[in-house]
Every structure is written in C-alpha cells, then in structure tokens.
Image (tube, rainbow, N blue to C red):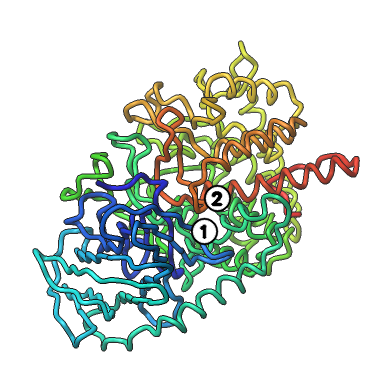
Amino acid sequence: MTAKIEDYALIGDCRTAALVGRDGSIDWFCVPRFDSGACFANLLGSEDNGRWLIAPIGKARARRAYRKDTLILETIYRTRSGSVRVTDFMPRTQLERSSIVRLVTGLSGRVEMRCELIIRFDYGITIPWVNRGGRNTLTAIAGPNRLVLHTPAKLHGKDMRTVGAFTVRKGETTPFALTYSRSYRPIDPPVRVGAALKKTEAYWRGWAKGAKPKGKWRDAIMRSLLTLKALTYEPTGGMVAAVTTSLPEQLGGPRNWDYRYCWLRDATFTLLAFMNAGLMDEAAKWQTWLMRVIAGAPSQVQTMYGVAGERRLDEWTVEWLSGYEQSKPVRVGNAAALQLQLDIFGELADVMSQARRGGLPEDPRRNEIRKAFLDHLETAWRSPDEGIWEIRGAPQHFTHSKVMTWCAFDRASKGTHLDEADKRRWKATAEEIHRDICEKGIDPKRGCFVQAYGSNRLDASLLLLPIIGFLPPRDPRIVQTVQQIEKHLLVDGLLLRYETESGVDGLPAGEGAFLACTFWLADAYILLGRLRDAERTFHRLSSLANDVGLLAEEYDPKDKRMLGNFPQAFSHVALVNTALNIMHAKAARRRGARQPPIRRHVR
C-alpha cells in the first residue's frame, strides 16, 4: 500500500529527485530529469511499477531527520534486536548521471535487513534486463536507460525483482549506490560513497551559508529554501513546481496534474524569496532562465515551460497506472501550457521591477521585452482567460487576471530609461483598466471584489489586490473582500482557492485547502494591521509541515492529511515570504515605524 503523501521525504541532486517513504521505500524517481519517465512509480501504482525498499525485517519504529542545512536524510530504525541508521542522499556531480546512495549503519545490537529493488522504466511498465557484472555489481538496461547497482550485500533475482537479506551489527555499514546513465555510454566508475557523502554535506551547508534568515522561524525558512534549491534544474536555472505528477487535489477524483514544469507565474514569488533571503546568485539564475524562455512573440508566451525552456508539454494519460489511492487519470504533460492566462504578463512586469530594485544585473533586452509585451497586452487585456487557477471550463473575465494586467501597465509607467510618451500611454491604460475593474469586478450588494465579472463568488487570489498595490489595504472594498473571503472560503483556519461547487472550472466539486492562499491571507492580515492573526495563521500553516519540514500543495482539514503534488514550490515560496513579512512587520512595530508594503518589495 502506498504511503500517505506526508510520509515522504525528498532527496535530490538539482537534476532530478526521489521520494523516500518513512518505511524505507523509494517510490518515485524520474531519470534523467525531473520531467522524465519514472523508473520507480509505486507512488502512482503498485510495487510492480517499481520501487526500492531497504528496511528492517519485522516490526520497527522509525524516526528521521535531515542533517542540518542539507538534503541528506537519516532514518533511524529501532527493533527488538538493535537499531540501524539508513542515510539517503543523491551526490551532486558534473557528469551526466544521477545516483542514489543508501548507507545502512548499525547503531546497536544486530538488525536483520531486507532489500527489494524493482526497476520499471517508462512510468512503471518497461521491465529491464538485469545482469550481474561482477560480484558486487548489477546492471539493468532497457532501451536508452541503464541503472547500475553497486553493493557488497548478497542479492539475487526473484520474480522479476532483485531481493536479498543481510545483517548489520553495531559499527558496520553496508553501502548501496544506484546510478543512472544512458545505456549507450560507457559505465561510469562506482560512486565512492564516503567521499560522496562528505562532498554532498559540504555542498549543501556551503550553499545554506549564503542565506541570511534568523529568528525563531529560521529552520522552517531554511528548509523551504533548501527544498526550492532541490527543485531547481541546475543546468538551466529553471525550477519545477513539484517533483511529482498526478498526486490528487481530491482523493479519488480527476484533479490530478503534472507539476514537473516551470511556471512563469512563480517568477515574482520565487525571485523575492531568494532576494529577501540573501540568495542573489539563485535569483539571478532564475531571472536568466526567465528571460531566455520568454524570448519571441508576446502572443506565443506560455504559462509554463520545460526545465530547459521546452514549449511542447503535450498532455497524455498513463493508462497502466492506477493512480494515487485510485485517483485517476494519471497525467503526463500539462495542457494548461497553451491556455491564455493574462495574469502572467503582470507577473513578468513585476518581476522586472523587483529585479531592478533588488540590484540584479539588468538583461540587455529587458525594456525591449517589456514594450513588446505591453503593445500586445493593450488589446489582449479585454479578453476572457482561464485565469490563475488554469480552469478547464469556459474562459471568464477573472478579476485577478484584470488586476495583473493593470499591474503590468502600472509598473511600466513607473519604470526608468523608457520613452516618456510610452509611459504616459501606459499610465492611461492602467487607469482605464483600474476603472473597469472597480466597475465590473465588485459585488454592489456586499461591496467586495468577486472572482469574475458578473459573478458573486469569492476567490483567494483577490487577497493579492492590496499586496500588489491595486488599492490601499484600508480601502473599504479591500476590507470587505477579506471579510467575505474569511466567511466563505476559510475552513479550520485554512483557505480554499475558490468555491468549486460553482462549476467554474469544469470539474467535479471539492478539493483541499490551498496552502499558498492561506499564506496570502496572513500577508493580507499584516497589511490590515492584524499582526496577531497573521502569526496565528502562520503557526497553523507551519504546523502542517511533515516531520522533515515539507509541504504539499493542499491539505484536507477533514481527513487531516496532505493533498496535491509534493513537495510544492508554491507552498514553500509562500512560507519564506510570509515568515519574512511577519518578522519585518514586527521589527517595524518595535521601532514605531509605519508598516511598508509587503511581498512585492525587496528588503
């Protein structure tokens, strides 16, 4: 039986990643990239779709943690006969390969262990040929894919699996190193596990030293930053939204999407998280990736891209996988890449503004890109779109989308080194959009903003209006919007994205609370001077992280469990930004200073 989402931990090498269950089973591993086919797909199917288990035989109690400021996972198993520590990590290398290293070290007594390696390439369907290449080496090959296992443990083949049992005594270590590379290339030398462990630990701790968060939330912020780094594809600087596909937003339902791609919408949030944490190199890499992928005609800009900037993300269904807890379909690719989502133009304009304020090197074509986009948006802003939530229903005139088009023109009209005539025209367009929104995007009876023109529904994205400066936080329409969102979307202290029963998204009703939106609520509380409510909300959210500090996309307040893809970059970016916003607000209050705007401003 597949574990709960929160029972997994992440290891990675900034090219791909693996999910390790509390039970010692690696149930998800895609090679050679985050968005490649999985060779361990038990997460979305069964054991027969691939996994790698190393665990004690019989009953054992497990406790796990990352080594401080690293992505090295240590799980301690205690049994009646003794205890062992399993150390899991992925060495970083300049070679075009990825390895998973697992070290089983005896801590006390003696423990009987078992290993079960089931390799199934191509999302759990392709069974490889497995050959022994010497006493301590096994090689599995299918088409272009190859995995090589080095271990002194005695393993043998059984029922298309590689299995074995071994004993670990106090002070002994049994190593395992599984390495992926292309089958048509020479086999690389075995990983020197001791040296690899030292280098991996030194790398992560060295990287973490570049961050500057302090205070009581330092560890939560640092774990989130390390997770974001692990979700970054090192060769290009692109960051995936999560390492998984099709973990459901509703158990047993069809809200299952592939998140192993890079969303333009995440740009501003991510850039600010890195810059506010002092990680300017990471912010610069993200900006470089962003400027590279948006090159071309503005009408062809997509909502998301592959990690190297690929545009083709064709969506298809993996029919042979049963889905996480029978949640089908299992999807690969994402059709939302071709949707019209007008808000991304506002995010791009804002990210350019934030990059300039933060002192990042200016892209030589930044102003040219801005002008081309705004020329396109002068007409496009009037169109309906699929919005921030990428609905699969009919396009709407979403209020948040319109507000972000206002943001695009507003930021450009205040830019530097730009033609004054253009700036005047952009300011006039921003004012026109502002009037349009205030006329059509408000419920006249309640005096609050609504999800879409002509609708009376609420949407958590409306919390971003005061944060981006569309209206002052104390404006009665903003205050009323926050109150109505609390009334209609807040469940057990957590926020739903929108009212799914309306059918606006073309899908069956029901999903979990969206964690990033709840962080936005805390940010809105800060702007409204409700700092105690902001702290309480942040504590509620941070308590939902699993035992190693990871968050999924959503949380089910009724069943008390995580939902959605994991670990979710959007959730961790929001945690970093909100924590820093609260710390900044508290410091300002102690100084008696006026609380400045948040999130959209680098500090």
Q: Residue 310's x, y, as percent?
A: 38, 63
- Mark 1 and mark 2 in contact? Answer it, CB < 8 Å: yes
Task: Give me the residue at 38% from left, 27% from top.
Answer: 510
Residue 300 visible from this viewpoint: no
Residue 557 visible from this viewpoint: yes
Q: Amino acid at mark 2?
A: His
Task: Give me the residue at 67% from left, 55% from top.
Answer: 218
Vertical arrangement, residue 379 with respect to residue 231, above or below: above
The residue pinned by badge 1 equals: 227
Q: Quadrant of residue 449?
A: top right
Q: Is residue 326 left or right of residue 169?
A: left
View extreme (right): residue: 592
Say which of 217 and 486 sits in front. Answer: 217
Location of the C terminus (image quadrant): bottom right
The residue pinned by badge 2 equals: 572
Mark carried by residue 109: none
- Crowd around label 2: few <14 · some 14–19 · many ≥20 (10 Å): many
Q: Amino acid at mark 1?
A: Thr
Say which of 447 and 140 sits in front. Answer: 140
Say which of 458 and 47 sits in front. Answer: 47
Task: Give me the residue at 86% from left, 39% from top.
Answer: 594
